[in-house]
């Protein structure tokens, strides 16, 4: 059956990396897909450019979203971010990442209630260029798992600044590690923090407590 849509009519049919049923039938494509499957995957192949973790949380999605959208929730469910205080610039928060000793970390939260996305724009040492972006989305589990609760997706992209500090002049002189030194551990570390998020939300939900404490709503 031919399509009435002008799909890719403006492009040549032999583009490298393009695999579509019109040019590669199922018999041809199946071996390609099977070759992409591995029983063991190199860590860098899975987490070298992007780091994504996900988890089911037995708590209402709107409440999980509301909790995440408050920057101060990071004080509770992250492993090492502590002491959030607002700065003069509206929406910008200063805290300390104890993973980097006494490292200052700046955070601005960009949230969308319609899509339930929560993006944390962060940076060590300075608050002018928030290049560390933590992308999170809350999904209603009834849609994707056919049961109540939430699915939380979390992705980080390997920004080139992880490889080299772009603002060395703002770093405290006594600090040895750079945030990018921990990239290989991001997946495990983020899953640990996701389990923190799950434990906190599920405990409060099961005990009839608001997921977002009153002190966050102040």
Image: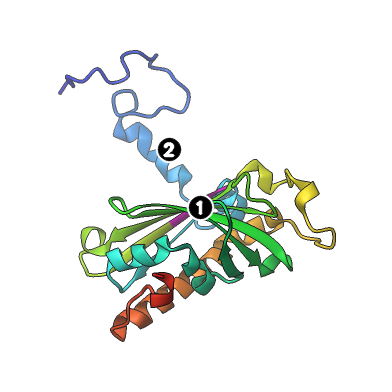
- x and y percentages locating residue 3 in the rendered image: 18, 22
Q: Is residue 213 visible?
A: no
Chain part drawn in magenta: 154-158
**For mark 2, what is the residue?**
32
Residue at point 63%, 45% (across, down)? 128
Image point 56% across, 56% down: which residue? 107
Q: How many neighbours does mark 2 have within 10 angstroms: few (below 14), some (14-19), or many (20 or more)?
A: few
Picture quadrant of residue 159 = top right
157 is within the stretch colored magenta: yes
Badge 1 element: loop
| Location of the C terminus (image quadrant) | bottom left
Q: Residue at 46% of width from left, 49% of height from top?
A: 37
Q: Main secondary structure of the magenta part?
A: strand
The residue furthest front is 88
> Which residue is at the front of the view, 73 or 143?
73
Task: List the residue tagged with mark 1.
Answer: 90
**Residue 21 as seen in the image, left or right of residue 146:** right
User: Where residue 199 sits in the image (x, y, percent)?
Assistant: 42, 78
How many residues crowd around disc 1 within 10 Å: few (fewer than 14), some, or many (20 or more)? few
Please state which of residues 25 and 181 is positioned toward the viewer in this rendering.
181
Is 216 above or below relative to 50? below
Between 120 and 197, the residue placed more toward the observer is 120
Q: Secondary structure at mark 2?
A: helix
Q: Quadrant of the N terminus?
A: top left
């Amino acid at each position: 059956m031919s399509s009435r849509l002008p799909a890719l009519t403006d492009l040549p049919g032999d583009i490298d990396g393009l695999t579509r049923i019109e040019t590669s039938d199922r018999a041809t494509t199946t071996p390609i897909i099977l070759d992409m499957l591995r029983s063991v995957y190199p860590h860098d192949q899975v987490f070298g450019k992007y780091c994504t973790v996900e988890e089911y949380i037995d708590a209402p999605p709107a409440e999980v979203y509301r909790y995440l959208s408050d920057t101060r929730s990071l004080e509770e469910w992250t492993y090492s971010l502590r002491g959030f205080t607002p700065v003069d610039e509206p929406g910008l928060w200063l805290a300390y990442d104890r993973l980097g000793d006494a490292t200052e970390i700046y955070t601005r939260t960009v949230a969308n209630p319609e899509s339930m996305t929560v993006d944390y724009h962060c940076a060590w040492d300075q608050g002018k260029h928030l290049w560390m972006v933590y992308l999170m989305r809350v999904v209603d589990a009834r849609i994707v798992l056919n049961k109540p609760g939430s699915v939380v997706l979390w992705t980080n992209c390997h920004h080139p600044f992880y490889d080299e500090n772009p603002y060395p002049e703002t770093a405290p002189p006594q600090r040895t590690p750079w945030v990018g030194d921990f990239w290989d551990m991001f997946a495990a570390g983020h899953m640990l923090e996701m389990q923190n998020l799950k434990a906190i939300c599920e405990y409060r939900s099961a005990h009839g407590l608001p997921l977002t404490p009153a002190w966050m709503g102040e």
